Amino acid sequence: MSRNDRTFGISALRIALLLLTAGTTILHTGSLFAQADVPLPATDDGLPGAGPIRRYDWFQNLWKELHAKWAKTAASDQGAVVFLGDSITQGWGDDFQGLFPGMHFANRGISGDTTRGMLIRLKADVIDLKPKAVVMLMGTNDLEEKATPETIAGNLKLIIAELHKAAPETPIVLCLVFPSSESKSRPADKIKEINRLYSKAVRGDALVTVLDTWTLFANEKGDAKAEEMPDLLHLNEVGYRKWAGALRPVLATLGIMDTEKDKFVPEDGFTSLFNGTDLTGWGFRVTPEATRTSAKKWMASDPEGVVWPFVDEPISFEGKTMSSDSRYRAIHGRLVVATPPEGRRIQQLYTTEEFSGNFTLKLEFRATPNADSGVFIREPQLQCRDYPLAGPYKTLKSYKAGDWNELVVEVRDGVAYCTCNGEVIEQAMKVPATGPIGLEGDRGQMEYRRIRIRRN
């Protein structure tokens, strides 16, 4: 319905006649005509999807108010990162609380909305904006309206399919449904089942990054924590900061944030193991037979749980910006171990050089919530994860969630002494006499930078 009157030579009189004929409200926003009235259908007849659509008076008023507001910004919102969701998304505000400075975002959250409601408005609110990426959080209100997890996941599948059809190259960040409480008609077991079905629905979809926001906010019982969700449903300022911290690494990998190359220069005596531009000096090693045997048993026992690809011949990534499986990527000074579309994918990237004798290894890492990775010191693996959620070092006081943390490994006479931000995590890890440095990928996303070594 959007047209530029100068481009198409439509006179003011003809525009008026078109408006009267269409019977809808049209606003002129620069060179774009945007529909201000996105009607909420009066009945479910003929609508896509299944499950509840809210039609309370307050919701209908909010729906109309927000769509009238969004029509005025439709032109400037073109090409934005669009957030689609309900009240938790709406709570970001138009400026996203200043937590993503300089970024081009559009908030399309409507308080109280359900997955079916979002499916109905998907074209007008998301697709028509030609988004650079879409961040989605949805499903909690469906539970309050007694929808089943299967119905909710079915609507998600339709939304994903419509986005892929309209914009087959647009990346999607799917945030798992946040924890709440049975007192809010959102019991933990139902939310966990929705999230399981969500993950299953997008398994293998390279355009969808699943962000584990459930683990990020859940307490030991699987419910919301009052210090982040005072009403056990909506985030406070602390909660939004945590969510922003979880999103930043993923948005950086999508090229939306952190687009300038890191200008760090190693200290005297240290040599960089990663040049920040490509994977020169790194590659895949042949999978040992013992590893193959245990991996096959694991995959056979849990076919949908983990993927463990085997390497039959050594592969060097000299001059390559990405590994052959697309998991490891050199992006603006960061060596990114991207979130696997399968949910869990076990792979290791090693230096082509081996290191004997004593040395000091330094690097920084940034993890998404509950991410699981590791750093191989010649052969043994030093767990490198989102420690507070994934362990094993859950009591660290200096760990910075969603931010950069420094790992230092001192190898002396076959023993490694390891610290994270100065806190000891391993005092005497035995290592072989020689071997490479490796980076593992498992679940979630891990980024590494400033990887350097000094031979002592």
Image (spheres, grey):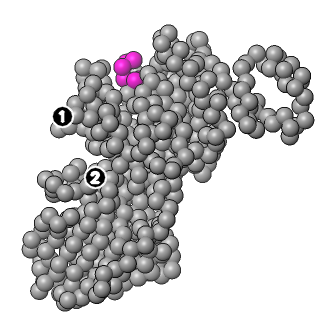
Q: Can you give x and y, in whole percent of width and height, for residue 285 in the image? A: 36, 78
Q: Residue at x 41, y 64 (%)?
A: 336
Q: Residue at x 45, y 39 (%)?
A: 96
Q: Is residue 151 left or right of residue 384?
A: right
Helix, strand or loop: magenta stretch: helix
Characterize the local packing of mark 2: few (<14), some (14-19) or many (20 or more) Cα atoms within 10 angstroms.
some
Up-down relation of residue 219 to residue 12 (above or below): below
* Marking on residue 401: 2
Quick one: quadrant of the C terminus? bottom left
Q: Can you give x and y, in whole percent of width and height, for residue 9 in the image? A: 90, 35
Q: Between 28 and 159, which is closer to the camera in this rendering?
A: 28
Up-down relation of residue 204 to residue 69 (above or below): below
Task: Report whether residue 307 is seen.
Answer: no
Of all residues, the one furthest to the left in this rendering is 428
Q: Residue at x 67, y 38 (%)?
A: 75
Tag 1: amino acid: Lys
In primary-sequence order, the first of circles 2 and 1 is 1
Task: Report whether residue 27 is seen.
Answer: yes
Up-down relation of residue 327 to residue 248 (above or below): below
Label 1 residue SS: loop
Q: Is residue 2 magenta?
A: no
Mark 1 = which residue?
Answer: 221
As measured in the structure, the alpha-carbon distance from the residue carrying label 2 to the one carrying label 1 is: 21 Å
Span colored in magenta: 141-146
Label 2 residue SS: loop
